[in-house]
Image (cartoon, rainbow, N blue to C red):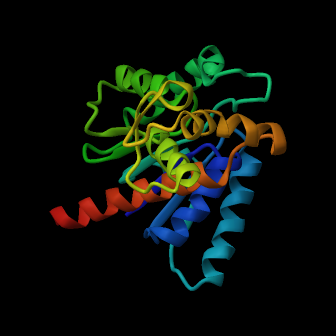
Amino acid sequence: MKVCFIGCGTIGATAAYATALIVNPEEIVLVDIDAARQNAEAEDLRQAVTAFGHETIITGGWENAGESDAYVITAGFRRSPADATRDALIEKNTPVIKEIAGKLKPIAPQHARFVISTNPDTVMKKLFMHETGLSEARVVSIGNLVDTIRLRTVSGNHKSLCLGDHGEEMIPVFEDSPEHIHKTKNSALEIIKGKGFTQWLPSTAIALLLKGIKSAKHAKA
């Protein structure tokens, strides 16, 4: 399996590391608008992969992005403590997604799957689908999985699920505690207020989705 990460910021780099550990793909490609950072992250990850005994090929740049089985889009502006909701990022991140969609359309293979992390991820997923003409079967956003894990962490109820839009507009299932729901909806903002960004859960969610994509790919083989 070949996975391409577009965006080497906090979540992109961390998700690539989590993917190397959890999914162990044959190849990982890192792409970023900052070529120096892109190449440094690729080399750093390449050394880490060697340390834990995997043989994943690590490369960087759009020139290596073609023919990937999965593309993870984390590029864009991240939420700040001043942003009451993720929707505050729509105007800033719309041109980012449009540009990436335009670059991916001619190089992504017909079987490729796409994981959207850029916020607001539900809106950006729909925008990406519109720009590429891809169906929902090939494009997924991470929000429902992130919200579900947060709700299960808060409530201790591992049957809980979250549907709908990511965050403030999520729809909880099998959970009716107003306290748990409120805490889940506000969890990301509280983390952002404390450390400036969320990192570990979104990155892990991306790796878990890629693990599922890899399993489905092998099941069809």
Where residue 57 appears, as percent x and y from the top left, is 52, 70
Is 23 or 41 nearer to us in this picture?
23
Left or right of residue 107: residue 133: left
- Residue at the extreme bottom of the image, as rendered: 53
Residue found at x 52% / y 26%: 97
Is 192 or 155 nearer to us in this picture?
155
Is 27 or 143 nearer to us in this picture?
143
Residue found at x 62% / y 49%: 12
- Residue at the extreme top of the image, as rendered: 91
Determine the image quadrant of residue 221: bottom left
- Residue at the extreme left of the image, as rendered: 220
Count of numbered marks? 0
Observer able to see residue 63 = no
Where residue 188 appears, as percent x and y from the top left, is 67, 39
Residue found at x 51% / y 42%: 147
Where residue 89 appears, as percent x and y from the top left, is 64, 21
Residue found at x 58% / y 50%: 154
State which quarter of the image contains the N terminus. bottom left
Left or right of residue 201: residue 146: left
Observer able to see residue 218 = yes
Where residue 20 appears, as percent x and y from the top left, is 53, 68
Determine the image quadrant of residue 130: top left
Quick check: 33 above or below 70? Answer: above
